[in-house]
Amino acid sequence: MPRLPKTHAPSEAAHAGVISFGAGARKTAWLRRLVLFVAVPLMLLFLLLSAGFIRHVYFNRSGLPDIEGFIRFEPPTTGKVYDARGKALIELAREYRRVVSYEEVPVILRQAILAAEDKNFFSHSGVEYRALPRVVQKTIVRSLAAWRKGGGFRLLLPQGGSTLTQQLVRGYFLQDRTNLEAGDALFRESLMPRILSAGLGPRATNKLLRKLEEVRLALWLEEEMRRRFGSKEQAKREIFARSASFHYLGNGRYGFAAASE
């Protein structure tokens, strides 16, 4: 009578392998559900916010400030008291300023301003996109450093990276926003700022929204100035002259001409 082959019970190692495989399958399924229900909605939210920002910055031209005052460029300077013959007796300074044209700014001073603040001023369209990677890197480094110190995660945007046009827009059109952005109240109570504030906090959200508005107005201003003055070169000269006449340089003096007196 032929002998039947001997059968063996499953070993403990094989049994453990089956259990391990089952646990791995369950873990993979759990990760898939996590991606499906968490990562995908977050990605869709990010894309939605990005699309909203792009539309607002590059295509939305509603709610723009009055360009005429900027074209005339009549910021507060000094009040003068005259005698009966029209001679100035005293100056009552609210902002001591001398408004100059591009040609009145010495060449060496123009070169120094551009080298220090915006070396590509005459070539860009109001925003220096090549500075964006550096700004993003500094933002990540500063924000993570603050988080590691135990201060909680905050979006810390670095100084610098703004063009002369952006700096002028910030001081001329967005001064109120800049003064109020450190507060705990949002500029706008619409849905998008509230979503951002939930993750970043109101101060970081205010600063981010102000920065986006600064970019939007810088692009608009350069477009409008080109249309008004007929060429990019002349528009740039007009913007440069206004920038050189506008910013506070200490001791109650505004603009380089007043600061040099």
Image (cartoon, grey):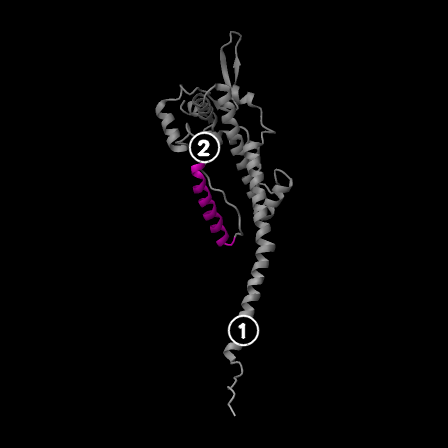
Q: Residue at x 53, y 70 (%)?
A: 21
Residue 46 percent coordinates (x, y): 56, 46
Q: Which residue is mark 1?
A: 18
Task: Name the amino acid type tagged 2.
Answer: Thr
Q: Please tell me how crowded label 2 is: few (under 14), some (14-19), or many (20+) other residues with Cα within 10 Å.
A: many
Residue 189 vs residue 234, the one in the foreground? 234
When the figure is inspected, residue 187 is found, relative to residue 257, above or below; the finding is: below
> Start and end of the magenta stretch?
126-150
Mark 1 crowd level (few <14, some 14–19, many ≥20, 10 Å Cα)? few
Q: CA distance from mark 1 to mark 2?
A: 63 Å
- The residue wearing badge 2 is 163
Closer to us: 119 or 247: 119
Q: Position of residue 109 (x, y in %)?
A: 37, 26
Q: Is residue 80 above or below residue 133?
A: above
Residue at the left extreme of this rendering: 108
Identify the secondary structure beneath mark 2: loop
- Amino acid type at circle 1 is Val
Task: Tell me the SS state at disc 1.
Answer: helix
Residue found at x 53% / y 50%: 153
At x 55% / y 69%, what residue is drawn? 23
